[in-house]
Amino acid sequence: MERSTDPFQQEHDPGTKRLQERIRHLVEAHYSLGQIAVHLTGQQPTGAWRTRLISRRDWAAWTEDGLPDPEIEQFYSFVSRYPIVAETGQRSRQERKKTKAKTKRKHVPLPEAKQRRFHPKYLLLPLFFLLGVFGTYLFDRYDGVEKLQTIATSTPEQSETEKPAVTEESEEAPAAEPETTPVIYITATNAQIFSDAEQTTALYEADFGDRYTLVKEEGDVLELTLPNGQAGFIAKSATTDTLEAKATTDSAILDFVSERLDTSWTDVPVESWFGKSKAELAESLGAPGKELKDSLHTYLFYGNHFFILKDDKVIAIDWTNVSLPEESYRSLELQLDLPQGKYTSSDKYAMQVIGSNRVRIAEIE
């Protein structure tokens, strides 16, 4: 039997009240109506409303004030037609941050300083100091006289040999600055990397923001070193060696991922998955829905994201079907911001926005 989609008819139903509360939390986390529907029912909607992002005010206006909104009504009708996925009981990393109790440091008064009494022993300290200075003076004077007597009685040959040798090597040479390895970044979408300088045999298809070590430049062609050590060649026009801003922080990238991307599939921080093997992923998440391989990497697909593995270790996580407005990226210090993608990096991580609907976070090797 189909449930009523009128929120005012169901306001006293505890199940409906909890459903609306879950939807409100997902709205506040900037999920689209389609993503919320998939999260709650496991079903993929097809209506035009699925790409809409609503605000908490929009949701409250429809559920509490009764203002009409056809797209929200279609969304709620869709959700109401299916069994709602049970909550796991695990709170997201962002919720745990918001609900963490703030502890107050207790003020502990400092003990009052005890009044010190003057003691005659303190008179001895200046006396010992003066005796030490006077003894040092006498020792230096006697030592200087003894050296003068030794020089006066020595032969000219002896005095010459006692002079310290001065060599040019005694001056310390300035330390050489460490050499930096030149790096280039892919600025094209689906850029072809070839196995030869003539670019006749395609070897690998690189994504926007991929970075490689530059070996040398020959005209309009660059020779690169691929992650497996193999040489690759690419057109210079598909790359850049200049970033437009300074690197951001690790926490800025990780906060963006946890707040803007779908992390409902993991109960641990996203960065905990780096370094995991295929077997460890299967043990925690089950078998992947699809597995692909190329000459460099293995790709394991799980729902709306996939893992990229090199040498059986996760080195990147890629989210697909991402729909975020441009203003979502303003919290980041973007080093590349082009129509075909965006890029920023920190000490440990690189974040690539590939095209209009893919976001990748990778460990920098």
Image (tube, helix red, strand yellow):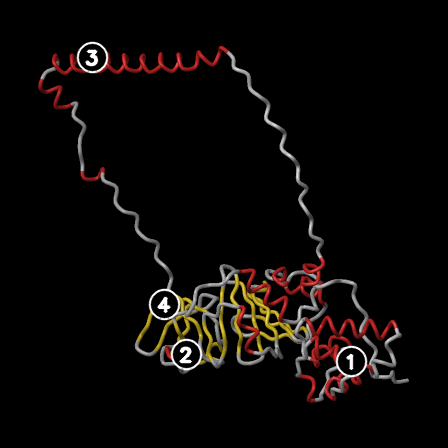
**Which residue appears at 49% of the width and 65% of the height?**
345
Q: Gap in Å between the C-alphas at discs 1 and 3?
A: 104 Å
List x then y, in percent, for residue 27.
Answer: 70, 74
| Residue 238, numbered label | 2
Q: Nearer the viewer, mark 2 or mark 4?
A: 2
| Residue 65, numbered label | 1
Q: Quick one: SS at disc 1?
A: loop
List x then y, in percent, for residue 259.
Answer: 63, 68
Counting residues from the start of the chain, the first of labels 1 and 2 encountered is 1
Question: Is label 4 in contact with label 1 (beta carbons under 8 Å)?
Answer: no
Q: Quick one: SS at disc 4?
A: strand
Name the quadrant containing residue 149: top left
Vertical relation: 70 (above or below) 302: below
Amino acid type assigned to the residue bearing label 2 in the image: Ala
Q: Gap in Å between the C-alphas at discs 1 and 2?
A: 53 Å
Name the quadrant containing residue 145: top left
Question: Within 10 Å of the Cα at label 4, are there few (<14), some (14-19), or many (20+) other Cα atoms?
Answer: some
Counting residues from the start of the chain, the first of labels 4 and 3 encountered is 3
Q: Quadrant of the N terminus?
A: bottom right
**Which residue appears at 54% of the width and 72% of the height?**
329
The residue under label 3 is: 146
Counting residues from the start of the chain, the first of labels 1 and 3 encountered is 1
